Image (cartoon, rainbow, N blue to C red):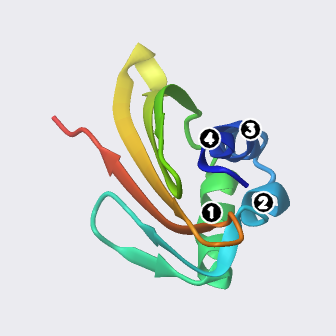
């Protein structure tokens, strides 16, 4: 997969809470770095974490801007929260040679 294609697959999988579609995007040894700095390493741990997120019915991310390079992509995101609040976030995806997500760094604006 090309970096520019990631948003067309990643965000629909999240919105559908489709763990199989979601996990098909990740390399077996992928790393997800969460906003608090915690690292989740390997497909089984990523599956467990995201399955919990899907089960709790978290807010739905909406991409608002995309910048793609040869093997990476940055996506600015609006996350609509209860009460009409909008949280700003950004995901930085790095892909491996097979076009799978090797590293995903998640950031969010606080305050």
Secondary structure of residue under mark 3: helix
Q: Earlier in the sequence, mark 4 or mark 2?
A: 4
Q: CA distance from mark 4 to mark 3?
A: 14 Å
Label 1, on which residue?
Answer: 50
Neighbour tally class for label 2: few under 14, some 14-19, many 20 plus, Cα within 10 Å: some
Q: Measured from the top left, where is residue 19 in percent x and y?
A: 78, 60
In this rendering, the label closer to the viewer, 2 or 3: 3
Secondary structure of residue under mark 1: helix
Between residue 4 and residue 59, name the one nearer to us. Answer: 4
In this rendering, the label closer to the viewer, 4 or 2: 4
Q: Earlier in the sequence, mark 4 or mark 3?
A: 4
Rendering quarter of residue 98:
bottom right
Secondary structure of residue under mark 4: helix
Label 2, on which residue?
Answer: 19
Q: CA distance from mark 2 to mark 3?
A: 11 Å
Q: Measured from the top left, where is residue 21 in percent x and y?
A: 82, 56
**Residue found at x 60% / y 56%:** 53
**Residue found at x 67% / y 66%:** 100
Neighbour tally class for label 3: few under 14, some 14-19, many 20 plus, Cα within 10 Å: some
- Mark on residue 4? 4
Q: CA distance from mark 4 to mark 2?
A: 21 Å
In this rendering, the label closer to the viewer, 3 or 1: 3
Label 3, on which residue?
Answer: 12
- Mark on residue 74? none
Q: CA distance from mark 3 to mark 1?
A: 14 Å
């Amino acid at each position: 997969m090309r970096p520019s294609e990631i948003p067309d697959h990643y965000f629909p999988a999240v919105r559908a809470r489709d763990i199989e579609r979601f996990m098909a995007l990740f390399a077996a040894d992928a790393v997800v770095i969460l906003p608090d700095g915690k690292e989740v390493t390997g497909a089984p741990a990523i599956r467990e974490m995201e399955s919990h997120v899907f089960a709790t019915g978290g807010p739905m991310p909406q991409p608002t801007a995309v910048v793609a390079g040869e093997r990476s992509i940055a996506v600015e995101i609006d996350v609509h929260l209860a009460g009409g609040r909008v949280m700003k976030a950004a995901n930085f995806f790095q892909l491996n040679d097979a076009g799978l997500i090797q590293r995903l760094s998640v950031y969010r604006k606080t305050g």
